[in-house]
Image (cartoon, coloured by chain):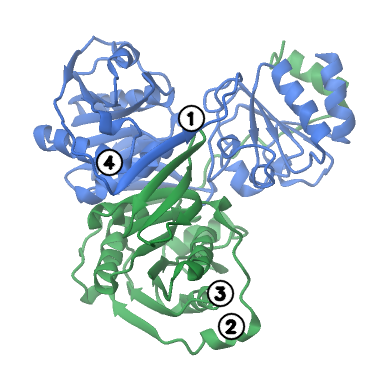
Chain colours: A green, B blue
């Protein structure tokens, strides 16, 4: 079984909003990158498929050269190889990223594509479903449990929804997006970290692929959201709290 | 602009967020001229027409088919592609939900359309419509513009008001006869039936965080929730620990809420959680830690032992 897993480097959550905005505008910014949390869950799930016959686990990242160490960290969890699509100076939108991934999928012909349910930087939650639609493959998003059929041709999944859990069975090949409670990603061991440095990466330049030149979505501008008023009223105890809530007519 | 509002119908009902999507379409019509229609998507959906009628839509299309009962992404996409090919809408709007997050980008992929998820507001600028979204856990606001001929957006319900009254529209059933796709089988939906109000629209929400350390303390928090007639929510830590089901999770990857009163009990206030509560009118922090990050966004706080504060509140209410 061939598994393709997508990995996106994102700014960690301790990055101040101003630095993150500078980064988006391609200005000098002091940002610590980490692999997207949900993508590591996807990598972990791929590794757990080894018992179901996954013998080729390939990570793919649409990212520039300076972020390759993050792909290496994910590789060190135990994947076999990596592919990079380098966008160069372009700011790709989700449609362009999905088309680039479609190119890789058609070349690699995996049985399953595992992705994080969303990236924690732009919170778009689009690329997995978009890719499945472009490929005309089945999809299962926000998956919190996944069991492969003994024959290896279907997976039964539980999806987390606003109302509870949906259970689906999808025939492979399919795109699966992973939610938080699917698993707990392992940490790479030191020997694996050393080993991962030697894994060859296949690199494509976005500009040389049969992909759209122009994005469908452009960024107009960034702003810092209006803060809340910042004035906090302290109540000494439960009695005072209830009195304040009643006085402000927040409770009866 | 010619707009379609796509609304998923679950067991004959539309969700409250559908009203926000209609209001969003009304606002865009007001800014750009044009008109909007509504598509109801599901199985046996006739009873849902009343909930979306009377808001000035031009037509209400009924995408009614047994294949649409489970709201799977593939048949939903096929049905909407069919409608889009007939009418050539410029803008497709849906309420943001796990249903829309599943099928809407698939539709965008099939139609090569640009999409913005969780839009709070639209404004007209010289280059066209701009959509406001919260990104990076709500710490940054970004304005985005869609350049493809078809634009697709999902609407963040907590940021948009109620729809304005308007004329009634005719309901037009469409014959779809969707083929079944054997590659995906819907097996079941499991949900915890709760008597409490829906988190997404509740006027008062009680949130439970990691600071609640025992089952006994949790049952006190639930008691408080019911005494206030509130909805119950939780942080990721509480859901991960298996204390509450996933649909209770509030935050970046869970639900966004906009109550008048949010009572956060034992919640430290990680950015991922705060991303989901920014639209709350009044945030009350009940916490033992005076340095908790939640205090940066809270309006009222009481610092102390939850094991004493919550039972005392129960006595007073």
Q: Chain of mark 3?
A: A
Foreground of the two, A19 or B48: B48
Tag 3 residue: A77
Position in image of residue A1 (x %, y %): 38, 70
Q: CA distance from mark 3 to mark 1?
A: 39 Å
Mark sitting earlier along the chain (4/1): 4
Q: Residues within 10 Å of mark 1 (few under 14, many from 20)?
A: many
A191 versus A59 height, above or below: below
Q: Residue furthest left?
A: B86
* Residue at disc 2, secondary structure: helix
Q: CA distance from mark 3 to mark 4?
A: 37 Å
Can residue A133 be seen here? The reply is yes
Q: Chain of mark 1?
A: B
Image quadrant occupied by the N terminus of chain B:
top left
- Whether discs 4 and 2 lie on one chain: the answer is no
Residue at left offset 35%, top offset 50%: A170
Q: CA distance from mark 4 to mark 2?
A: 42 Å
Position in image of residue B136 (x %, y %): 51, 52
Foreground of the two, B267 or A91: B267
| A118 to the left or right of B239 | left
Mark sitting earlier along the chain (3/2): 3
Do tag 3 and tag 4 residues touch (Cβ < 8 Å)?
no
Tag 1 residue: B158
Tag 2 residue: A193
Residue at left offset 43%, top offset 39%: B98
- Name the mark nearer the viewer: 4 or 2: 2
Q: Residues within 10 Å of mark 3 (few under 14, many from 20)?
A: many
């Amino acid at each position: 079984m061939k598994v393709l897993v997508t990995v996106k480097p994102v700014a960690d959550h301790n990055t101040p909003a101003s630095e993150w905005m500078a980064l988006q505008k391609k200005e000098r910014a002091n940002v610590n990158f980490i692999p997207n949390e949900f993508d590591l869950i996807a990598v972990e799930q791929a590794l757990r498929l080894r018992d179901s016959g996954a013998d080729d686990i390939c990570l793919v990242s649409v990212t520039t050269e300076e972020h390759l160490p993050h792909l290496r960290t994910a590789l060190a969890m135990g994947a076999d190889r990596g592919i990079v699509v380098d966008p160069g100076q372009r700011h790709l939108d989700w449609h362009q990223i999905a088309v680039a991934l479609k190119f890789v999928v058609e070349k690699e012909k995996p049985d399953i594509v595992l992705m994080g349910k969303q990236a924690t930087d732009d919170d778009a939650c689009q690329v997995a479903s978009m890719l499945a639609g472009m490929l005309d493959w089945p999809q299962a998003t926000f998956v919190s449990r996944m069991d492969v059929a003994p024959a290896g041709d279907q997976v039964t999944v539980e999806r987390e929804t606003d109302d509870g859990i949906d259970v689906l069975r999808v025939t492979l090949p399919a795109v699966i997006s992973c939610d938080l409670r699917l698993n707990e990603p392992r940490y790479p061991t030191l020997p694996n970290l050393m080993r991962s440095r030697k894994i060859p990466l296949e690199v494509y330049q976005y500009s040389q692929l049969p992909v759209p030149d122009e994005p469908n979505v452009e960024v107009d501008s960034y702003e810092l959201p209006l803060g809340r008023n910042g004035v906090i009223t302290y109540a000494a105890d439960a009695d005072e709290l209830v009195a304040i809530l009643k006085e402000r007519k927040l409770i009866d | 602009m010619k707009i379609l509002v796509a609304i998923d119908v679950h067991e004959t009902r539309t969700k409250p967020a559908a009203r926000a999507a209609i209001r969003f379409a009304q606002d865009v019509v007001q800014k750009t001229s044009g008109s909007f229609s509504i598509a109801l998507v599901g199985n046996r959906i006739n009873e849902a027409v009343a909930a979306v009628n009377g808001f000035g839509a031009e037509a209400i299309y009924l995408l009614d088919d047994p294949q649409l009962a489970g709201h799977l992404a593939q048949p939903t996409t096929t049905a909407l592609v069919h409608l889009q090919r007939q009418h050539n809408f410029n803008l497709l709007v849906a309420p943001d939900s796990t249903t829309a997050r599943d099928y809407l980008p698939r539709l965008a992929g099939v139609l090569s359309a640009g999409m913005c998820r969780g839009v709070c507001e639209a404004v007209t600028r010289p280059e066209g419509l701009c959509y406001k979204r919260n990104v990076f856990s709500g710490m940054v606001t970004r304005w985005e513009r869609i350049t493809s001929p078809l634009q697709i957006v999902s609407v963040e319900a907590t940021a948009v008001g109620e729809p304005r009254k308007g004329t009634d529209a005719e309901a037009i059933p469409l014959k779809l006869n969707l083929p079944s796709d054997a590659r995906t089988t819907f097996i079941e939906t499991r949900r915890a039936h709760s008597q409490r109000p829906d988190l997404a629209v509740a006027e008062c929400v009680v949130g439970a965080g990691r600071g609640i350390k025992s089952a006994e303390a949790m049952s006190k928090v639930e008691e408080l929730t019911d005494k206030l007639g509130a909805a119950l929510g939780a942080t990721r830590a509480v859901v991960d620990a298996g204390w509450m089901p996933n649909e209770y999770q509030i935050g970046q990857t869970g639900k966004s809420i906009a109550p008048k009163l949010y009572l956060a009990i034992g919640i430290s206030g990680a950015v991922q959680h705060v991303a989901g509560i920014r639209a709350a009118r009044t945030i009350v922090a009940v916490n033992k830690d005076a340095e908790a990050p939640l205090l940066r966004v809270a309006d009222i706080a009481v610092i102390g032992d939850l094991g004493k504060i919550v039972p005392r509140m129960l006595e007073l209410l």
